[in-house]
Amino acid sequence: MMVYLLASVLLLAVYQVHGQREEFKCPDDYGFYPHSVSCDKYWKCDNNVAELKTCGNGLAFDDTDPKYLKENCDYLHNVDCGSRTQLEPAIGSLHCPRLYGIFPDDVKCDTFWNCWGGEASRYQCSPGLAYDRESRVCMWADQVPECKIEEVANGFSCPAAGELLASIGSFSRHAHPEDCRKYYICMEGTAREYGCPIGTVFKIGDTDGTGNCENPEDVPGCEDYYGDLDLKAIRKSELLSGLENKSKQSSSTESKAAPAAPKQQPQRQQQQSSRPQSQQQQRPQPQPLPVSSQPSKDYEDA
């Protein structure tokens, strides 16, 4: 009885798939068309023959090409599925609810994972920031609902109103209790964590709530913060990098002001093939990682 029931279910599934293929008629000899109800399925037409295809688990078919010539599966959050609400059941792995996608960490609110084929790459927001799962960027930790107060500033509490001199302005700076390079800025009672540029540490000012980033040798107790690192070489490298960036920006401005005449393409390159190349399930270009995030590494190496 059980074997008969299983065989019946398999026959029904084959019949349904076959029926789907019979119902879909290719609008043209060649192209890629969205499924009517599924966001991660689509139809590939070749010589007017339709084939049902499925994107990777966590990807969806991008149907924005008006000519239906692009075969592109992109991250689910990048695709407007509209009425195509059905999806394949989730297939997950460690840190990846689906095999493809960008997902927040289950424990640390400043960490997120970029999953590709079930392999997770770990990223961490800059100090004081946290990954917002709605906008998918790193924001101030106190603006991310999932972050607890303890995570925002490691339990640091800003001074109560009136405890500091009014002369220091609308915000105050405070040293981190454990890390010479880190410090907190308090704004309207909210603490946000910052970090000094590499090669420097935070020096407490003469007035409560003030301070600046200075050379380690000028900050008592933090002289050996960088150990054996060659700070002079690091500073020189950063200086050269800054000059190089300024030079590139200047060159870019000049090129925009006086653009070079475009070269004429050879005639054979102007002829397009009547049959476009398939791009099925190429790795999508996910939206750029938040500018305030960086690949996970020790803070001292940032």
Image: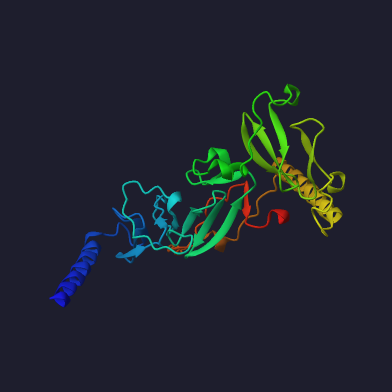
20, above or below 290, in the image: below
In the picture, measured across the screen, residue 58 lies left or right of residue 257, that is left
State the colouring used for the structure image. Answer: rainbow
Q: Which residue appears at 76% of the width and 33% of the height?
A: 210
- Furthest toward the left, the residue is 1
Snapshot quadrant of residue 212:
top right
Q: In which quarter of the image is the N terminus?
A: bottom left
Residue 12 percent coordinates (x, y)? 18, 68
Q: Which residue appears at 84% of the width and 50% of the height?
A: 223
Q: Nearer the viewer, residue 122 or 208?
A: 208
Q: Nearer the viewer, residue 68 or 78?
A: 78
Snapshot quadrant of residue 99:
bottom left
Q: Nearer the viewer, residue 32 or 129?
A: 129
Q: Can residue 140 be seen in this view?
A: no
Q: Which residue appears at 21% of the width and 71% of the height?
A: 10
207, above or below 134, in the image: above
In the picture, measured across the screen, residue 262 lies left or right of residue 37, that is right
In the picture, measured across the screen, residue 1 lies left or right of residue 230, that is left
Q: Can residue 300 be seen in this view?
A: yes
Residue 291 percent coordinates (x, y)? 62, 47
Q: Which residue appears at 54% of the width and 38% of the height?
A: 143
135, above or below 161, in the image: below
Residue 282 percent coordinates (x, y)? 48, 62
Residue 148 percent coordinates (x, y)? 53, 43
In the picture, measured across the screen, residue 191 lies left or right of residue 219, that is left
